Image (spheres, rainbow, N blue to C red):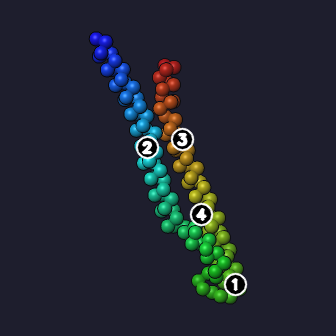
């Protein structure tokens, strides 16, 4: 009888730690891969670094003063919009992950109160 209680206690502790490892460590890897993939897709769309490198180049190789001014203005706007979208996406992704991390403690606290 005593050995079975010890065995069940060890299995309980093992399953709790295995659940926590699965929920927090493995899900962090999966979610970070997902978020990085989405950032890569966003970067293919906005090409932030390429736009920054070419910010002082004229738009469509129009080497007049108007081409330089319009190129700088359009690229600056594109950098600003892309930066805002990156920041918004980062904060949304961070909030989703914080909610994901908070689910087990919230469920545990609500089970204890109930």
Res. 82 mark: 4
Q: Position of residue 93 (x, y in %)?
A: 53, 49
Which secondary structure lies at badge 3? helix
Residue at the image point whose x is 52% and y is 39% from the top:
99
The residue at which mark 3 appears reads as: 98
Please tell me how crowded label 4 is: few (under 14), some (14-19), or many (20+) other residues with Cα within 10 Å: some
Please tell me how crowded label 1 is: few (under 14), some (14-19), or many (20+) other residues with Cα within 10 Å: few
Q: Position of residue 5 (x, y in %)?
A: 33, 15
Distance, label 3 to label 1, CA atoms, is 48 Å
Which secondary structure lies at badge 4? helix
Q: Nearer the viewer, mark 3 or mark 1?
A: 3
Distance, label 1 to label 2, CA atoms, is 51 Å
- Marks 1/4 in contact by CB < 8 Å: the verdict is no
Distance, label 2 to label 3, CA atoms, is 12 Å
Residue at the image point whose x is 64% and y is 82% from the top:
58
Q: Is residue 105 above or below residue 42?
A: above
Distance, label 3 to label 4, CA atoms, is 24 Å
> Nearest the camera: 99 or 30?
30
Q: Is residue 22 above or below residue 93?
A: above
Distance, label 2 to label 4, CA atoms, is 28 Å
């Amino acid at each position: 009888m005593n050995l079975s209680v010890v065995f069940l206690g060890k299995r309980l502790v093992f399953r709790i730690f295995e659940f926590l490892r699965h929920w927090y460590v493995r899900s962090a890897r999966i979610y970070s891969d997902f978020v990085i993939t989405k950032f890569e897709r966003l970067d293919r769309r906005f090409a932030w670094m390429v736009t920054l490198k070419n910010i002082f180049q004229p738009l469509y190789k129009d080497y007049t003063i108007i081409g330089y001014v319009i190129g700088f203005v359009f690229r600056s706007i594109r950098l600003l919009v892309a930066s805002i979208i990156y920041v918004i996406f980062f904060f949304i992704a961070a909030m989703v992950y914080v909610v994901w991390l908070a689910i087990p403690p919230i469920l545990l606290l609500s089970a204890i109160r109930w």
